[in-house]
Amino acid sequence: MTREITLSQAVNEAIAEEMRRDETVLLIGEDVAEAGTPFKVLSGLVEEFGTERVIDTPIAEPGFMGIAVGAAMTGSRPIVDLMFGDFLYLVMDQLCNQAAKTHYMSGGKLNVPLVLRTNLGATRRSAAQHSQSLHALVAHIPGLKLAMPSSAYEAKGLLKAAVRDDNPVVIFEDKLMYQDKAPVPEEEYVLALGEAAILREGSEVTLIGTSSMRQVCERAAEILEGDGIGAEVVDPRTLVPLDERTILGSVRKTSRAIVVDEGHQNFGVTAEIAARISEKAFYHLDAPVIRMGAMDVPVPFSPALEDLTVPTAEGVAANARAIVRGVPVHAP
Amino acid sequence: MPRDGKANAEAYLRMYRQMARIRAFEDKANQLYLNAQMPGLTHMYSGQEAVAVGICEALTDEDRITSTHRGHGHCLAKGAELKLMFCELLGKEEGYCRGKGGSMHIADQAHGNLGANAIVGGSAGIATGAALSAKRLGRNYVTVCFFGDGATAQGLWYEVMNMAALWKLPVIYACENNGYSEYTATEEVVAGSLTARAEAFGIEAHQVDGQDVLAVSKLATELVERCRRGEGPFFIELETYRYHGHHVGDINREYYRTKEEEARWKADRDPIANFGKWLRSEGVATEDELAVIDSEIRDEAAAAVEYALAAPYPDAVEVDMHVFKGVDHALPYMSGERA
Amino acid sequence: MPHEVRMPQLGMVQDSGVIVAWLKRNGDPVRAGDPVFEVETDKATMEVEAAADGYLSGVTAAEGDDVPVGGLIAMIVEDEGDVEAAGTGASVAEPVPAPGAHAASRPDPGPERQETPALAERAMPEPVAAGRVLASPKARRLATERGIDLHLLRAQGIAEPIHVADLDAAIAVGGNSALSAVVDPTDFDELLDRSRTADRTRLLASFAAGAWRATFDASSVSVAIRGLDGSLEIVANPDRGGVGDPESPVLTLVDLCGTRIHRYASARDGLTLCVARSAAGYDLLLAFAEARLPLSNAVALVENIAARIENPLLQLL
């Protein structure tokens, strides 16, 4: 049986189910208890699990991140709530020098089963320090896994997988999607990390979209259908590990690819996926692989400017149309 | 622990032996480095032995520690074996971390050592988190966070002390004040007093002579017991001295401290020599008995070095192993091959 | 036990050190901690202390010598009687290799990393051949596999860069040239007789694909089979059991055996191979456009197909 719930409810359900299943799971972060975070994602959890397991911290991101790493090394399974993805910079030492490297540096003796939940996404008119999409920083660090759910269904299934994983897993949710509803089974399910989903089949171009850019790609595919162009939409779901088989299989079929992600375009996720396609499916490409990331400027406040910085369905469709028709996007 | 020689002879001789082992280990490690037989570099613990041994004497294998870049002493005091430590220092497969960590990252899970840390002050969070696990999961262990005076300049420590005090966690912050923050005298980088910093969070703070292993173990025993009763956290500042430079290659250091000062500490305040003297005066051991211990330990260290030098390096296939728990090889895994 | 005196590793980035001065002479008594010699490294001069008590012996490095880190330069012996004479300074012993300090002692980085230099070599800028046709990687690959000369497409006025769709357009130009051959049927008929399950049309498609693969060094070969009812079936790699995804077919096969019809060439199907059966044997007819399949390539292809029908063993090899 499925019902429609919001992404926020899906996350809440995933955490509650995992906390019921496993006594060692705890939730830690700023205003996670009574306040339930500014996005109200965690409302009700403290009532069920108490302040011993739903732990409000001072505003001290490096501190509670470090504490979570130590707790994870000693039998706890912390889910860390980082209120805004932009605060990732504050926890980089604990995340990248400690959590990511502990298993390797100890030759496999210690491990850090920890989930860091945070968010990404611009166009909330929150300006440059509350709008960034910084997941590429995480993807660059060996030892961290990275999930990018694009719906309530994925948010729940991937979060449950992350809690059960014995390694540090970082999950970015798009904060604009918390109220988006999607069908979610009532029965328990877990999605495997490293399995992409083909959300729509098409034969002429592959649109690869992460997080909310999956929805941008789906809207672009609808526009393209009106033009008689068949677009396939692939959602990688996790970037580390990355399901190359599904992505490359789709591109080998369509011969064309556009990679859409809300992180900055330069040196980013779109570049990495495009590079892997170019290396591994080169002889199947009938057009250059196109990257579409966030514009390489700090996120501006003014709506008139901010909306220019993120990829849109129309933009994706325009690029797809060009490469399908053999019109070079960049002059040869 | 009462200063009654006869009653505690076994414990005293154990502490003496542990301090001598640390000194012997460091002398050998220094020689390996100078002879270019050891890759990388290392930081010597010599001179600070009474701190690690005095504190770890109060701990069981269940109790946890976090350690620092100057961590060989903590590791040995917590029960590690010379042979496997030398193997790690030389990057050998049999090392504590299969050669992946080296001098600055030795972890010894079996004895509760959560690992040395090459980021100054980087383990304050880990130690506090270990204490959170103890409290939340109802386990009775205590965690000791070793760090140097240099680490007291890092912000992380203040954040986690605040939380440890708020949540009454069983953690002891043990600051080994050896007077130097890398190549700078600590008085030039520390404003006010260190104990006052902990006290500002309502944390009970103590100062102790870090060259007196009995004073250290007495205080540690008392605070560890109080931690177990839920009276933590605590802070201890241990006054001590490192005989070598910041790292093994830090030879010419007169620009930050004099040779006279070093000679004075070695002559008057050496923790091993002074404890040996006390053991003799109390009739716990004769000079000859201590000499036998010293020579046994030197032989043990020499044999451990020989063993480690001859031990094999890890196989090349290990390079992408242990990146993720439950994944044999990280490279194909990250490209989507199923584990 | 004698102690070795080696050139110490003093800096973090140091391969060798210059001996500025010996502070003790060969044979001098030394105590642990005594400065023994001065070393210059990284523009700093440092004193190196003795590690043991004894007598300095067998000094092999002279002042001014640049000695590799780890190089043996003297000994400290316990008894004065064991002191050996100083050397010339030219015979400094090889250093103990510091693990990890030399490429040779590093563990094998594995196949992924080893590829890097090769890639770098290939990435050297290739002189652009005059008249190089711009084409997508896939179009270029398919053109090679289909024996299509991209220059001929350009000459036809197809705009660059050439995409896969342009190759298909070229096929649609149709076959206005034709080659025909008559082939001895004996061995092929015997093969069909012996195998009760073999389907003639499939077998012909398989032979055509094998000939194509051999002639043009193609990795993937799809063949379209045109039925006499007008149907069109595309078979991927018929010579390899049909494994793989069907792609644009390299040619269309029309099997006329068993009918009175002798030839069929469709403008729509482009490159077309008709096979008919007459009293003389199998009649092969290849209809092609010389604009995209040069005559020499067409001849090579027909010869190869004919050879396989006359001697099916060739197909098995």
Image (cartoon, rainbow, N blue to C red):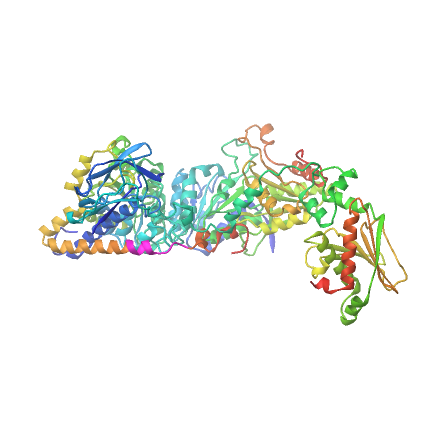
- Pick out the residue farthest to the right: C260
Quarter of the image holding residue A224? top right
Spot occupied by residue A152 in the image (x, y as percentages of width and height): 57, 47
Q: Is residue B164 left or right of residue B270?
A: right
Please tell me which residue is depicted at 65% across the width and 38% down the height of the picture: A316
Q: Quadrant of the C terminus of chain C?
A: bottom right
Q: Is residue A296 left or right of residue C75?
A: right
Can you say whether C217 is above or below A82 in the image? below
Q: Is residue B107 left or right of residue C259?
A: left
Residue A289 appears in the figure = yes
Can you say whether C219 is above or below C156 in the image? below
Spot occupied by residue C243 in the image (x, y as percentages of width and height): 68, 59
Magenta run includes residue B306: yes
- Pick out the residue farthest to the front: C88
Spot occupied by residue B294 in the image (x, y as percentages of width and height): 18, 53
Q: Which region shows up in magenta?
A: B305-314
Quarter of the image holding residue A211? top right
Magenta run includes residue B90: no
Please tell me which residue is depicted at 20% across the width and 55% down the height of the picture: B14
Residue A160 appears in the figure = no
Q: Main secondary structure of the magenta part?
A: helix
